Amino acid sequence: MPEKTVTIASRSGLHARPAKMFVQAAARQGVAVRVRVGDRPSVPATSMLGVLALGAEQGTAVILQADGPGAEEALDVLAELLSRDLDAEEAADA
Amino acid sequence: MPEVVRGLGVSTGRAAGRAHRMARPPVLPPPAPVTDAAHEISVATGALAAVAEHLERYAAKASNRDARAILEAQSLMAADPALLESVEEGVGSGLGAAHAVDAACAHHREALLAAGGYFADRAGDLDDIRNRAVAAVLGLPMPGVPDPGHPYVLIADDLAPADTANLDTGTVLALVTEKGGPTSHTAILARTLGLPAVVACRGAAGIGDGTWVSVDGGSGEVEVGVAEDVAAGIQREAAALRDRRDIGQGPGRTADGHRVPLLLNIGSALDVGPGAAEGVGLFRTEFLFLDRRDAPSFEEQVAAYAAVLQALPGRRVVIRTLDAGSDKPLPFLRLPGEDNPALGVRGLRTSRTRPEILDTQIDAIAEAARSSDAETWVMAPMVSTVGEAAGFARRARARGLSHVGVMVEVPAAALHARRLLEEVDFLSVGTNDLGQYAFAADRQQGELADLLDPWQPGLLQLIAMCAQAGREASKPVGVCGEAAADPLLATVLVGLGIGSLSMAAPSVPGVREALGRYSMAQCEEHARLALAAGDPDEARAAITGA
């Protein structure tokens, strides 16, 4: 199954606004994406509770996985999102 | 005729408006057998969808970006497919809609707690979703702070920190709670926000939603059923008083010019505010340590202390070392459970088992002090013996800190104030805990609120002993408990010989104004009257009549 590893760039981690943006973006993908940290069980990327329970802070590496048509594109979109400091963008447009 | 109900006034000022009650968390009905699983699932999912929608509306209205982000994230939690899946599993195993929602939230709560840190804080958000969704299933009003669409007096059983995080001081005019005492969360919050408040008011239970009430946060009287024009008059007076107070500025002094520094109680640099503070009398460092799996690093602590010290160049900043244990448990201290935590390992006592945490903290304070122009004082909480004071002073001075003091919260420390001052440079009286320990009355126990009244002559006698010891040793003795925030009591404390008063920022103008009205001789007379009184009411009456 295609996988992609990405390091969380947002200062507050995968929390509050960054988590919200990630979960909403995952829901827009045409394919089911799952996310995990290390060897721990993966959770659906569309689950806010699951994503928060990852406890991913700034600098944590998370692994995205998806399967089927469009999987690679979905992984690219979500990985690109996580590799940006979404908190800084929030401050910039404040 | 309006009916009067009484409680304990804990935050001075008057206000009037319509009363609105905070709905209590719903109670689960007794479990009943499920006959139509599909129906239970649809009721439960409908309730969660309603909650998600409600939170989204709240988020749209939030003025603060951080609050909005948290509410939006919370709304997504309520709509989370994983939560719905857990609800379906619950119904599948025989639970009704309300119980299935409760079980699903409990399940995900565990996962959030396990993630720790600020992820664990979101467990509170999930509890809120649970309460709201269960209420929706049962057809009860949504719990939480009401939103009647006009300014109102908030009536509650008691207020938890989560309830009040987003309290809008533009809409809430005053707080009245059935439970709580003078040092409960509600009381401290009200003084911080400058809202009149009455706690331990049993009669508040009978106040109907929408009734016009007036609240006197000084006397503790709540008038129920006042006329609308009377209420409007009270609101006009309150606004005029606020305007007058905002004008008063400058350092604290009595009418005849005796200087009494009015210092701030703060939890972080944010509480210093834009005003011209004379200094900080109590910097609580707990905020750095809360909700953490591990103690904060030396560097992180240096940065937090430096942020406060740099905001107050040339002024006094009294930093209190970690005050944990008891009502403020910290996971990383790994303290065993105690039957009676108020009398257990708390304050300085935690350094018996974890000395390295205190050492790192003192190192960080000393490092931050070196890089700032503020006058850095450091003090330890919950000191009971001369030996503990001497040990703390040794540790702090060894790191180059030159103003070392201890808090007086335990009666034994007050009794030995003179000997403590042979070891340390200053004392700071924490009246909340000193009252709790001197009167053997739990601070969280609303029933005993009268014993925790800072006007208790027995408590004032202990404070007088500390002040006397300070005068003899020519060393500063201040008060940093909530007693210092009561304008009239402040004149008593100054009359007893207390040299500085420390309080939440909104209380400073009222205290400054009260001190400015009386000479030192009058303050001393107030102190004599208060000490001689038989009880707090008599003490107040003697001074207002003087």
Image (tube, rainbow, N blue to C red):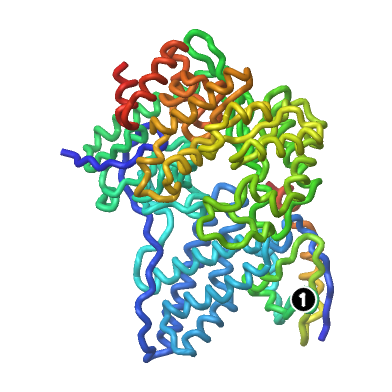
For the point 42% across and 41% down, the residue is B439
Q: Determine which quarter of the picture holds residue B531.
A: top left
**Pick the front one: B93 or B436:** B436
* Residue B274 appears in the picture as rendered: no
* Label 1 Cα neighbours within 10 Å, binned few <14 / some 14-19 / many ≥20: many
For the point 71% across and 48% down, the residue is A91
Q: Indicate the amino acid at tag 1.
A: Ala
Looking at the image, residue B301 sits to the left or right of residue B323; the answer is: right
For the point 44% across and 29% down, the residue is B460
For the point 43% across and 22% down, the residue is B492
- Residue of label 1: A74
Which SS class for mark 1?
Answer: helix
What's the chain of the residue with tag 1?
A
Q: Quadrant of the N terminus of chain B?
A: top left
| Position of A27 relative to B260 (above/below) | below
* Residue B264 drawn at (x, y percent): 58, 31
| Position of B353 relative to B373 (above/below) | below
**How many labels were placed on the picture?**
1
Q: Determine which quarter of the picture holds residue B35.
A: bottom left
* Residue B472 drawn at (x, y percent): 59, 18
Q: Determine which quarter of the picture holds residue B386.
A: top right
* Residue B482 drawn at (x, y percent): 49, 35
